[in-house]
Image (cartoon, rainbow, N blue to C red):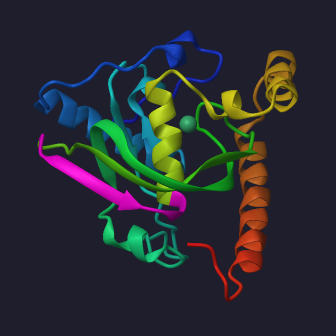
Amino acid sequence: MKLEVLRYPDPRLRKKGLSVKEVTDEHRTLVHNMIETMYDENGIGLAAPQVGQSLRLLVIDTRPIDEDEKPTTEGLTELEKKVKQPIAIFNPEIVVQKDLTDYEEGCLSVPGFFETVERASYVEVKGLDENGKEILIKTDGLLAICLQHEMDHLEGKLFIDRLSFIKSNKIKNKIKKSGYPTPEEVVEERKKVRELRAERRANTSAPDKKK
Ligand SMILES: [Zn+2]
């Protein structure tokens, strides 16, 4: 079942998610619906607070889609390839983080807006999988960035809160004044960002590529 994704400035996005003591069938149904919603919205990650559930749960799938609409591992880092996706993780916690990187981030709760955010480039995240089993994810690349972005949602934090005061206010005022772009405009904007990212990748894939 597809769920409604809340948009900034919905106050429910500001609530802290509660820890999940025990993963139940109800939680598994929520995971299933969140993954369906994420794919349907062409997102790469979704946190429970974004669908109005104040829980420490997030789902992620950062694999690129090929021409046949199938997920591929092309362009993923070696570490990313080792992680089975889609991921569902309860009570995620960063246990190790290293180095810094930046990326043009967007968010299903702030559709059509993209800005560069700085994050750790390598993280180790522990939590529970949908069977309640402890897992540890060690990754870099887009998956590391996405994990940190989604974990922010569990603290009631959005990527626009991580921007400079001026940039953040520019986005917030634009939304206040003219609302969100239409779905068509969001697609256009996404295309532009994708090109920008590809360009950046081409520039950084020089021999001394950052680890
Ligand atoms: Zn988000």
Q: Is residue 45 above or below residue 99?
A: above
Query: For ligand 1, which image quadrant applies?
Result: top right
Q: Can residue 4 be seen in this view?
A: no
* Quadrant location of the N terminus in the rendered image: top left
| Residue closest to the eye, 146 or 165 | 165
Q: Position of residue 193 (x, y in %)?
A: 75, 57
Residue for point 64% across, 79% down: 209
| Residue closest to the eye, 82 or 28 | 82
Q: Is residue 192 left or right of residue 54?
A: right
**Hey, which quadrant is residue 185 in on the image?**
top right
* Quadrant location of the C terminus in the rendered image: bottom right
Q: In this view, does 134 lie above or below 211?
A: above
Residue for point 60% across, 29% down: 158
Residue for point 42% across, 56% down: 61
Q: Position of residue 183 (x, y in %)?
A: 70, 40
Residue for point 45% across, 47% down: 147
Q: In this view, does 90 lie above or below 71?
A: above
**Hey, which quadrant is residue 138 in on the image?**
bottom left
Q: Where is residue 40 in the image (x, y as percent from the top left)?
A: 48, 47
Q: Is residue 208 visible?
A: yes
The stretch of residues the image draws in magenta is 132-142
Q: In this view, does 63 lie above or below 55?
A: below
| Residue closest to the eye, 187 or 122 | 122
Q: Is residue 4 left or right of residue 112?
A: left
| 136 falls in the magenta region | yes
| Residue closest to the eye, 169 or 50 | 169
Q: Which residue lies furthest to the top in this view?
A: 11
| 121 falls in the magenta region | no
Q: Position of residue 136 (x, y in %)?
A: 25, 53
